Structures are given as structure tokens and as C-alpha cells.
Amino acid sequence: MLEALRRGTGSWVVKTLLALLIVSFAAWGIGDIFRGGGDTTVAKVGNINITANQFSQAFQRQLQRFQESGSPITSAEARAFGLDRQVLGSLITRILMDLHTQDLGLSISEQRFGDEVRKNPVFRDSFGKYDRYRLKQVLAAAGMSEKQFVTSVESDLRKAQLINLIELVDLVPNALVEKLYRYKNEHRVARLVILPYEGIKAGLPTEDTLTKFHVEKAAEFTAPEYRTISYLSLSPQDLMDEVQVNEDDLRAEYENRHAEFVVPEKRSVDQILVSDEKTAQSAYQRLQEGADFAQVAKDIADLSVSDSDLGILSSADFFTEPLAAAAFSLSEGGTSAPVQTELGWHLLRVRNITLGNVRTFDEVISELTVQLRLSLATDALYDFANRVDDELGGGATLEEMSQSMPLKFATLGPIDSTGRNQAGIKDEALPSESEFITSAFKTEEGMDSGLVETADGKYYVLRIDTVLPSALRPLESVREALVSLWQQIERARIVRGNADTLMAEAKEIDALVRRAKELGYRVRYTPQMLRDGQDIDKALTTAQLSTLFTLNPGDMTSGPTPSEKSYVIAALEEIIPANPAMDPEGISKMRISIADEMPGDLLAQYQTGLENDTGVTVYPIALDNFFGDMP
């Protein structure tokens, strides 16, 4: 169970150790969590029990933090994510370190304690000064006495002393660096024999074999649950006929949105940008004398035609007013005098002018009518949805409501939870909103869902007419697919047997290659491969690569290729050792990487040693019972 705790927390335990001081100051309420408690023991550290009550306080506190951060997580979900192991691991670590620092005789001076408390922002007033009254307020809110607070802080400071000592270990032995370098950078080359499944005759299964195979592969040939669904839909578009607008409304809307109907004048603009005024004036002089703009841009600023093209711009598209004013003061084909901005000196040329205009009321009246009616319909939708809800509460059926109100009624299905029918095709009548299918598969047969609102403001009411339970499809309906799968597996079995025979007969690589070529199999070398899989041959799985790095030259391994369309025999041809002396930069990076990871590794090993010396026992049944009693 202790190993499970370590796997569950990963580096979390180490991070917790490093953060103990911060946690104590940031989350008052941890306090003396080991006081009192005579209930069921969930773990034991030395002769100290961690009770279910103590574990509950810590677990609920951590769960609350998740929930306050916006994660709506339940206790069951938190446990599935490993929060229970993290919390229990933290409690065990806390006790282990408390006991150990006491044994070492570590102590904290009054000055160090005072400094840590006074510099904590939790205890400062609005002016940023330490406030003892604020300290008392925080402790009172957390239900802690000052004695408990002092004990907790001193405990954490002692742990911080120990952890800091471990972190100071930064000497990485050369032998370790070189050994890890050789391990990581060793290359291996293998000879591959590829045995394809294609062309292998698998025959046909007997009826008894097929019947048994049908049962064995039930999971692959079981139909999902299908549902037939009737529904009403309500959207703003459905209510547009219910609202009317007059010309006064439309003219008022036009005036309010007048800016939207103004099409600004736009200009195609080229630019030469230089850093100093002298160069800009020189360029401008050449342009005034009739030089080609593109040629000047190339000569003065090394700009190509595309580099100098700013595009088609309105006045608002320029990043400064002076540039906009210069560009819009020119006639078509005109060139501006140099303009200074924070970027430098600009010369602008206007190639083309597209005049602006204002769309008149008559030009946009149809568009405005649709938009305004849609807006009013959207406003009315909420009240209409309440009316639908009242009708449902009064016992009206979906069909009846579709006759008396502007609601769309439709029936679809049978469909599965992905929206596909029994032919595997998406039903065209299925609404695209995800809330629809989710509600459909939460509602019981014969019942309606009530009003369902979607994220984009639509409403649905669903009724589940029929439910076809998930069931194994009859053999006859899947016979062809079943036979195909059986033959696929049979071909793989035959080829695997051929590979095993070939390996048994060959004994060594040269004989393997000769016999493989006689049988018509493809033989080739792999590239030089590292054990991390970055340069893995596409015919090998990562598991096969790992096996190759355990073999001696001449040894063989085999297995399906990643495509599962062939089988591969891999014979280790060569081991290419890494040479640290040839890669000083790689050695340096390796040393830095080890130095970064060493404190965490040492802390983890240190904790394991404390567990072994002190004795830690976890009672998983008590832990399971604790969660079994939770609502």
C-alpha cells in the first residue's frame, strides 16, 4: 500500500515536502491535525495513529480547495483522481518528518520564528505592516489556538531546515554522469525479417468454431442501446412570426446603428520605411524627380515590392494619425513627404483609391427587419419557454403543444448515444446541440425531459418513446464481419508460428537471413536506434525496442508490427557504445539535468528510509470503509 501511495503521489510528496512551510502559512486550519481522535485508524506511523477523523479533516479541506477553485468535483471523483492517496501520503510524510527532526534535535530560534510570521502577507494590514490583531483574527477563524499555531510553524521550520540541507547537495559524481550518458546514448542496430499476413490462407471456421468465437468476441459485436425520441424545439427563429416591427422602429434602429452602414474610403498604400531623416529626404527627392517607387524602395531600404505593400487600408487601419492624414491627403498615384513616427521615417504612395459610401435606409431595410425581429423574438423566448414549462406541468403532450404553439415537433431514431442509427449513419433530424443527446440518454423511457436549454439559447423538450437495450447482435447479422475477424486472427496465428519455426531453425543471424530470403521474406537493417524510441524503426513497437536493449548481439525477438498487418523478427546486429569523451556538451547537459533532479530523488529516498526505520502501516480496508460511509 505504501508503494501505491508513492505511485499515486509521484513527485507530489517531494513537492509537498518543499512546500510545507508555505502550506502552513497559506492554509491555516491544518494546525495540530493529530490532536484527539479515538476513531478507526487508517494508517500508523511508528506508534502514532492517523484516524479516520483526522484523515477526513485533511481530505475535506483539500476537496474544498478544489471546489473553491471552480472544479465541481465529488468525493468519488476526487478519489478516482488519487486525492485520497495524496492526502494520506502528506499526513504520513508530516508525521515522519516531525518525528525525525525531533530525533535530530533541530530547533528554531525565537528570532527565526518571529521573522517568518512577520513577513507572511496573511498577517499584514492594509498598509503592508505586520498586525498581531490580524494574526489573532486568522487563528480564530481557523479554530486554532496560538499554542497550536506555534507548534505547527516550528514543526514546518524544522522540516525546512532539513530539506534545505538535502537541496544543497549539488555534487554530481563523474562516474554517475558518464554511466547515465552511456546508458541514454547507446545505439543499437537490428536486422529485421518482415512476415506479412497478406496472402496467408486462413480457410473458413466451422459452425461450432464460429458460434464460440461469436461469444468470445461479444464486446465487439454487441449493439449499443438505441432510443426513439420525440421532441419539440423552440428557438428565436421560431418566434419571428410572433413579433412585428413598424417603420418607426426600423428608422430608430437605423439611426442607432448608423456607423455600421458607413463604408469608409480605402486606399492601396505602399511604404518606404527608413531610420533617419537624411535618407528619407534623399529618397523623397528621387521620387520627386520621377524615379520608380519600387526601385527607390529597393535601393534605399532593400525592400521588395511585397515588403513595401501595406495593403488596402481605411483611415482607421493606420497605427498613427500622422500616417493616416498623409495617406488620405494624397491623390491617386501621389507620394507623401517623409513622415516621422516612433518606428522611423515613412514615405507613402497611394496606388489606388476606393471611395467610401453610406448605405441608405432603403438599402438596408430588409436586413434591419430580419435582425430586429430576431432580436425581439430572442427577448420573447424566455417568457415563451416559461409558458411551455407551464403546459408541460399541466399534463399537455408534445403533440398537443405543437398544435397550439409555434413549436417544431419531430421524431427520430432509433439512435445510439453518438446519434447514429442502426446502420451507423448520423440521423439527419438530430439537433446539433450536445445538450440534446445528453438529455435524451438521461431521460427514462416513456418520460419527458422537461425544458432543456442549450448554450446557444435554444430550448428542447424530449420524450423517450422506446428503448432498445444493448444486446449481442445475432450471429447471422454479423456473420461476414465475424468470419473476417476470425480469419484475420487465424492468419496472425499462422504467421506467428512460421516466425517461431524460422527462429528455431536459424539459430544465428546469417542463417536467419539466408532462410528468410529463400522463403521470399523482406530483410533489412534498422537505423541506429536509441532506447528512448525517438529513432525507432516503424516496424517495431516500443516494447520490442525495449527488449532489443536487453539482448546480446545475435539474440532475437519477435512480435506483431505496429500496423498489425505483419509480423517481425528482430535480430540484434550491433551495439554502438556512447563515447562521453566525444560529446562534452552532452555531458554538460546531462550533469545539469542530474543536478536538477537529484534533490527530489534524494528526498524520495530519504522518505523511504524514514518509512522503513520508523515503520508505516496503511489500513486500506479502513480507508475503503471511510469512503463507503460518505454520502
Image (cartoon, rainbow, N blue to C red):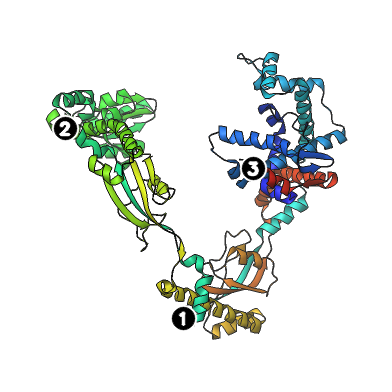
Vertical placement of 277 versus 354: above or below?
above
Q: Does residue 311 appear in the picture of this structure?
A: yes
Between residues 157 and 465, which one lies in front from this camera angle? 465
248 to the left or right of 597: left
Dot 2 or dot 3: first in sequence order is 3
The local secondary structure at tag 3 comes to: helix
**Is 626 placed left or right of 283 in the picture?**
right
Q: Which residue is mark 3?
A: 83
On residue 503, which mark appears?
A: none
Amino acid at dot 2: Val
- Of badges 2 and 3, nearer the viewer stands 3
Q: Nearer the viewer, mark 1 or mark 3?
A: 3
The residue at the point 64 percent across, 83 percent down is 506
Q: Could you tell me the amino acid type at mark 3?
A: Leu
Among all residues in the image, which is located at the extreme front? 395
Q: Residues within 10 Å of mark 2 (few under 14, many from 20)?
A: few
State the separation of the CA atoms marked 1 and 3.
52 Å
Residue closest to the far bottom: 518
Picture mark count: 3
Q: Which mark is residue 199?
A: 1
Q: Marks 2/3: CA distance? A: 60 Å
Up the image or down, 129 lies above or below 415; here it is above
Q: Which numbered tag is attached to residue 364?
A: 2
